[in-house]
Image (cartoon, rainbow, N blue to C red):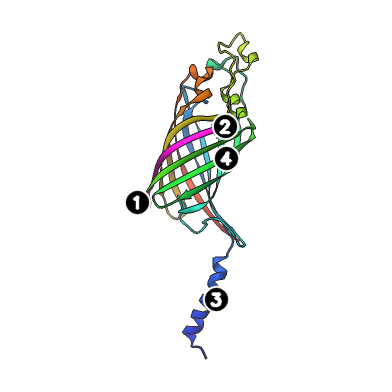
Amino acid sequence: MLSRPALVLTALVSAAPVAAQENALAFSLTGGAGVAPSYFGSSNRSVSPAISFGFQGLRFGGTQLGDPDGPKVFAPGAGFRGSFRFIGAREGKNELAGMNTVDAALELGLGVQYTSDLWQVFADLRYGVVGHKGVTGEVGANVIYRAPSGLVLNAGPRAEFGSSRFTNTYFGVTAAEAASPLNTLTPFSASGGIYSVGVEMGAYQPLGDDWGITGTLRYDRLRGDAARSPIVLQGSRDQVSAQIGLTRHFNLRF
């Protein structure tokens, strides 16, 4: 007959696989404020709300994406990630007088990533479910520093690309727009491809188990047809943006 300690140990070992298979969904939401060019190619900047979504991991049945039990920020390993971007409306006024207003856009998609303790590479692909209806994406890499206090710093190169539907929405000038007496821009058609390259630096400071402060500083330089666009030529190829926000982590068990 097994002793009481042996029975307890046996029960714990038997229960471990069941606990390991518990369904879980882990993600984060960040809300704050950002300053960025008023539109792609603008030399003026504006302040607006900033919202972002981060996917940490999903375990359902025998399938697992990411790691819902791992670190909340830059969790080591390979897996999928969510990708989200909101682009505000561009009004046809001031230096863009005579241009059509471009409605706000919401891009949703997925990405893949590989993260180690010290570095990360990733690629995202999104579709404009609201607004431009084009395909966009980003590839990049990060060097990662993890401080004993929990502070996480990252920095690395970025490259953004878009379909011709996307690039013409934000960098193209139609013949009708160019013919407007209010407009001094010439007709222009932008082809798809890489439209910007740059670098991003970020920081995350935890505030307890489920909260943290997230900040980013980013520089992009428009290239290709985007850089040759009359919209950009009267503005700036250099695009600087920054965001800061409060992050809330969620880990749902079911």
Q: Residues within 10 Å of mark 4 (few under 14, many from 20)?
A: many
Q: Is residue 13 above or below residue 29?
A: below
Q: Is 157 inside the magenta-drawn segment?
A: yes
CB atoms of marks 2 and 4 within 8 Å: no
Distance of label 1 from label 4 (alpha carbons): 31 Å
Distance of label 2 from label 4 (alpha carbons): 9 Å
CB atoms of marks 1 and 4 within 8 Å: no
Circle 2: residue type: Gly
Foreground mark, 1 or 4, reads 4
Question: Quick one: SS at disc 1?
Answer: loop
Q: Which residues are magenta?
A: 148-161
Pointer 3 residue? 14
Q: Position of residue 150 (x, y in %)?
A: 38, 52
Q: Position of residue 32 (x, y in %)?
A: 48, 39
Q: Is 153 inside the magenta-drawn segment?
A: yes
Q: Residues within 10 Å of mark 3 (few under 14, many from 20)?
A: few
Q: Give the mark nearer the N terminus: 1 vs 3.
A: 3
**Disc on res. 147:** 1
Comparing 143 with 94, the one in front is: 143
**Disc on res. 157:** none
Pointer 2 residue? 162
CB atoms of marks 2 and 1 within 8 Å: no
Distance of label 2 from label 1 (alpha carbons): 36 Å
Foreground mark, 2 or 3, reads 2
Pointer 4 residue? 125
Q: Quadrant of residue 85?
A: top right
Question: Quick one: SS at disc 3?
Answer: helix
Distance of label 1 from label 3 (alpha carbons): 37 Å
